[in-house]
Amino acid sequence: MEGARLRDANLYGADLLGARLQGADLTDADLTGANLEIASLEGAWLAGANLTNANLRGAKLQGASLPRANLTGANLRDATMDGAIAVDFSGAKNVPARYLSHGTLIDYISNPIKD
């Protein structure tokens, strides 16, 4: 599903374990409670996406754009987000410490501090 156009998609509770969504357009998609564990979301556009309580454990989000995305309750344990844009970690769980060096809102993650 690389480059998929899933704008405004209702993916509430979807099991997307290991999904290959590189470069996908998930603008304003509802991913509430979705399982995105070890999903590849490099370069994906997640503007305004609802990721409340989503499982993003081990997800690859390098270069992804997340302006206005809701990560409340989302599990980000072991997620990689180098180069991600406009990430607001407010309310997210298990955010790797290296991404919190600048507070909860990251405009652009370039060279995070290594754990």
Image (cartoon, rainbow, N blue to C red):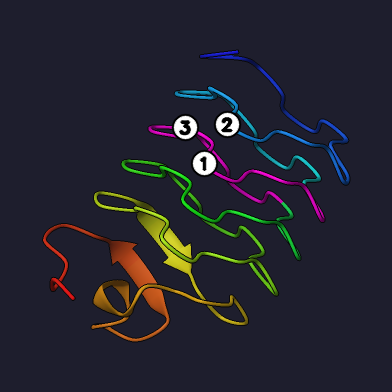
Give the percent coordinates (x, y) of residue 21: 54, 24
Residue type beneath disc 2? Gly
Name the residue carrying label 2: 18
> What's drawn in magenta, residue-wise?
32-49
Q: Tell me if residue 53 comes above or below residue 110 in the rendering.
A: below
Circle 1: element type: loop
The circle drawn on residue 38 is: 1
Dominant secondary-structure state across the stretch colored magenta: loop
Which quadrant: the C terminus?
A: bottom left
Count of numbered circles in the view: 3
Image coordinates of residue 101 in percent, x first then y, are 24, 83
Q: Which residue, given by chain and number where applicable, does mark 3 sit on?
A: 40
| Labelled pair 2, 3 in contact (Cβ < 8 Å) | yes
Question: Do the numbered discs 1 and 2 sit on residues whose CB atoms are within 8 Å?
Answer: yes
Amino acid tagged 3: Ser
Quarter-of-image position of residue 87: bottom left
Between 39 and 82, the one nearer to me in the picture: 39
Distance in Å between CA atoms under marks 1 and 3: 7 Å
Please tell me in which quadrant of the rendered image residue 18 appears: top right
Q: Quadrant location of residue 55?
A: bottom right
Which is nearer the N-term, disc 1 or disc 2?
2
Find out whether the residues at labels 1 and 3 contact each other: C-beta distance under 8 Å.
yes
**Dot 1: within a 10 Å radius of its alpha carbon, few (fewer than 14), some, or many (20 or more) residues?**
many
Residues packed near mark 3 inside 10 Å, few (<14), some (14 to 19) or many (20 plus): many
**Tag in front: 2 or 3:** 2
Q: Which of pointers 2 and 3 lies earlier in the amino acid sequence?
A: 2
Q: Which amino acid, mark 1?
A: Ile
When the figure is inspected, residue 81 is found, relative to residue 41, above or below; the finding is below
- Say whether residue 75 is left or right of residue 113: right
Residue at 64% across / 43% down in the picture?
36
